[in-house]
Amino acid sequence: MWLKSLLHLPAEAMTGLATVIGFVLIGNLTADEQNALGNMLFLIGQILSSNATQEQAIQSGTQTDPASALTQRLNELEQRLKVFEEGAARLG
């Protein structure tokens, strides 16, 4: 399939191809049409990226409970603040 071949292009070639396609698409489109098409393509990209991220998280087994991740981050920040306050007290 041509899409699989496209995905195996070197990064520079893919970037160049995307640039050419972008300039070809703006050819006969009004600014409103360009904006609508750009937003639709951007949304497609976001959906692909979000799905891939979720798939990678599931495969790697690194999915964590959001609440526990936030609690852990809060604890880390509290520890850093405590170290900062102790250092400031010694200087002041």
Image: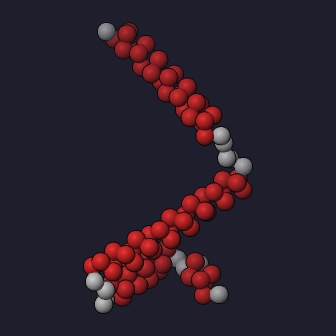
The residue drawn where x is 63% and y is 34% is 68
Q: As displayed, is residue 70 above or below residue 46?
A: above
Q: As displayed, is residue 26 above or below residue 54?
A: below
The residue drawn where x is 45% and y is 21% is 81
Q: Is residue 65 visible?
A: yes
Q: Quadrant of the C terminus?
A: top left
Q: Is residue 12 visible?
A: no
Q: Quadrant of the N terminus?
A: bottom right
Q: Is 49 in front, or is 37? A: 37
Q: Is 26 in front, or is 60? A: 26
Q: Position of residue 42 (x, y in %)?
A: 44, 69
Q: Is residue 33 left or right of residue 77?
A: left
Outermost residue on the bottom side: it is 28
Q: Position of residue 31 (x, y in %)?
A: 27, 79
Q: Position of residue 51 (x, y in %)?
A: 61, 62
Give the total number of marks visible in the rendering.
0
Q: Is 37 in front, or is 88? A: 37
Outermost residue on the left side: it is 31
Q: Is residue 3 left or right of residue 11?
A: right
Q: Position of residue 6 (x, y in %)?
A: 56, 82
Location of residue 25 (image quadrant):
bottom left
Name the colouring of the figure.
secondary structure
The residue drawn where x is 42% and y is 19% is 84
Q: As displayed, is residue 86 above or below residue 19?
A: above
Location of residue 41 (image quadrant):
bottom left
The residue drawn where x is 30% and y is 90% is 28
